Amino acid sequence: MLLQSILLMAPQPGQNPIISFLPILLIIVVFYFFMIRPQMKKQKQQNTFRQELKKGDKIITIAGIHGKIADVQDKTFIMEIEGGVRMKIEKSAVSMENSMALNKAE
């Protein structure tokens, strides 16, 4: 099926070869603007959010653990949860959406 599609898209005699590849180029452009670019933008926002977190900020992890940042390190946080218990978590484990919603609610 795929081979037939590729063979059918081969340029016909007298036809401009660019026109025959136009549908493939259009699919790539649409895929980029509707899937890849928004995901890259969201990833950049998450990285910026995690880098701007500081001591005392309230956060929620992707596992749903609520706590407050007690110490900031290069790639990790020391998070204090209920009862004074401290946990070491990766910065990538912080949920941007949930943490922002938590801080807006207060």
Image (spheres, rainbow, N blue to C red):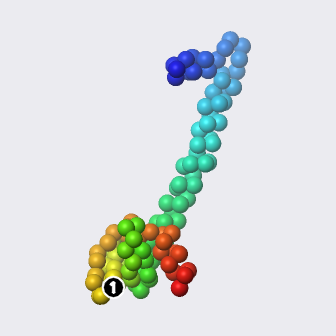
Compared with 21, 84 (above or below) is below
Compared with 84, 36 (above or below) is above
Q: Hey, what amino acid is under mark 1?
A: Glu
Residue drawn at the location 33% of the way across and 85% of the way down: 82
Q: Quadrant of residue 23?
A: top right
Q: Nearer the viewer, residue 12 or 90?
A: 90
Image position, residue 60 (x, y; %): 42, 74
**Pointer 1: residues within 10 angstroms few (<14), some, or many (20+)?**
few
Q: Quadrant of residue 25?
A: top right
Residue drawn at the location 37% of the way across and 67% of the way down: 63
Residue 48 visible, this orientation? no
Residue drawn at the location 61% of the way across and 31% of the way down: 24
Q: Nearer the viewer, residue 106 or 35?
A: 106
Residue drawn at the location 63% of the way across and 42% of the way down: 30
Image position, residue 39 (x, y; %): 53, 55
**Disc 1: which residue:** 82
Judge left or right: residue 18 versus residue 54: right
Judge left or right: residue 93 versus residue 15: left
Residue 1 visible, this orientation? yes
Q: Nearer the viewer, residue 64 or 61?
A: 64
Q: Quadrant of residue 28?
A: top right
